[in-house]
Image (spheres, rainbow, N blue to C red):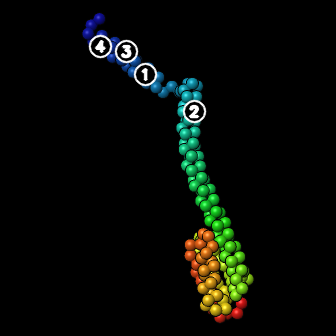
Amino acid sequence: MNKTQRTLSVLALSTAALALTACDQSKPPTVGEKIDNGIARAQEAATEAKQDMQAAGSEIKQDASQAGTNIADGAADMTITTKVKTALAGDGQLSALAINVDTSNKVVTLTGPAPNQAASDRASSLAQAVEGVTEVKNLLTVGAKS
């Protein structure tokens, strides 16, 4: 064989090998490869779903905690209102029915009539003496009829 024929043979074999390699790359994936790819995608989706659920769970816990706090605060305010009304009912000069007692965040607001300034001041003192009260806003009208 001469040098030209050898060069042509090597070139032909290289071209054939390159063509076979190119053909190998374009063949469709096998069933096993498809299953492996499907499993990998399912695992990625499951991981993302788990992360989403953890984030949602954390948010739900926080919302539930806040709701519990709001309920407890509301119950405390109702208890304070009831105790202030009871204290006012025990005073002969103050009308527990005519005096409105509102409690919000442990702050008591008194509205309505008081026969005189001393009775109005006493209403404030009675309200302030109730456990849990942080402030009393006395908006009673002195001298008004009950």
Image height of 120 relative to 85, above or below: below
- Residue drawn at x 26%, y 10% is 3
Which one is in front in this view, the residue at disc 2 or the one at disc 1?
Answer: 2
Asked whether the beta carbons under mark 4 and mark 2 sit within 8 Å of each other, the answer is: no
Label 3 sits on a secondary structure element that is helix
Q: Is residue 45 visible?
A: no
Residue at the right extreme, as displayed: 97
User: Where is residue 126 drawn, in percent x and y?
Assistant: 63, 79
Label 2 sits on a secondary structure element that is helix
**Front residue of this view, candidates 10 and 85:** 85
In the rendered structure, the answer to whether residue 87 lies left or right of residue 51 reads right
- Image quadrant where residue 63 sits: bottom right
- Residue designated by label 1: 21
**Front residue of this view, candidates 41 and 91:** 91
- Residue designated by label 2: 38
Label 1 sits on a secondary structure element that is helix
Asked whether the beta carbons under mark 2 and mark 1 sit within 8 Å of each other, the answer is: no
Which one is in front in this view, the residue at disc 4 or the one at disc 2?
Answer: 2
Which one is in front in this view, the residue at disc 1 or the one at disc 4?
Answer: 1
Disc 1 residue type?
Thr
- Image quadrant where residue 84 sits: bottom right
- Residue drawn at x 68%, y 73% is 83
Q: Which mark is residue 13?
A: 3
Task: Measure the alpha-carbon separation of dots 4 and 3.
Answer: 10 Å
Which one is in front in this view, the residue at disc 3 or the one at disc 2?
Answer: 2
